[in-house]
Amino acid sequence: MIRWVAAIIGYSLFRFPGAIIGFLLGSVFENFSKSSGGGSKTIFTQSRGQVSPAEFELNLLSLASIVIKADGSVNQKELDFVRQYFVQAYGKDHANATFKIFNEEIKKKQLSSQSICTSLRNRMRYESRLQVLHFLFSISKADGHVSEQEVREINSISGFLGINYRDFESIKAMFFSNPDSAYTILEIERSATTSEIKTAYRTMVKKYHPDKLQHMDEVYRNGAEEKFRKVQESYEQIQKERGF
């Protein structure tokens, strides 16, 4: 049953070849579930209106591929980061099966970040989409440098995901170091008053609190904790600067 549901999902995403992909992926998940004694790790439960685990993984790999290729080259450190991330999230066997299907079927097609993001935007919580954005910046930073081309590509993806500009700039600032980074992360101006800074901090704590991603696997919650730490560090830095 799982494999045929996945086949239907695949068909809706990629038309005829996608139905085959969906069937194969469904088989992978079904077998993996049996071998693990009841359930593979999944980011979302399969229910109407949500992104299925199979669909999410392929879409996430597709977006990762687009970002990695944004500057015209494929960096091994960025590839290794993606592989490690997926292995930590799903286990080696599951991740390898997904990579195989992606490499053999999906990446041969003309990937469209707009169509991928439209699908995700309609069926993912906003805080989950923020985590996808953080993941894409983490990929681009894996080689120690986020290129302008990668930033432009991630900015485009952010727009397609329906992420507002201030949130995009906040997450982007977590990967760059400049005098205004702490303020940008808290989504305030350097001229903000002490009261405005404290209010902004409380707002960002609520927005980026790891509990917002309890529906996701541990590796994604770890990413949320990283964002949360950046908010705390930014606030502490501003406190020291302002002396309050």
Image (cartoon, grey):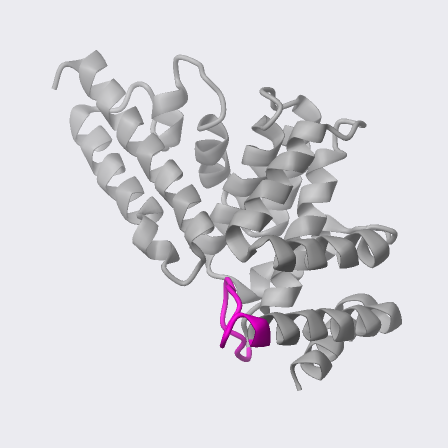
> What is the residue that sits farthest to the bottom in this orientation?
1
240 shown above or below 8: above
Task: Write down the region rendered in magenta.
Answer: 34-48
| Viewport quadrant of the C terminus | top left
Foreground residue among 154 and 35: 35
18 shown above or below 103: below
Magenta stretch secondary structure, dominant: loop
| Viewport quadrant of the N terminus | bottom right
- Residue 184, by quadrant, is top left
- Residue 54, by quadrant, is bottom right
Where residue 235 appears, as percent x and y from the top left, is 25, 27
Q: Is residue 181 left or right of residue 86?
A: left
Q: Is residue 117 visible?
A: no
127 shown above or below 6: above
Foreground residue among 189 and 44: 44
Q: Is residue 55 visible?
A: yes
Residue drawn at point x = 71 percent, y = 29 percent? 76
Where residue 199 appears, as percent x and y from the top left, is 21, 37
Residue drawn at point x = 27 percent, y = 42 percent? 205
Residue drawn at point x = 81 percent, y = 28 percent? 72
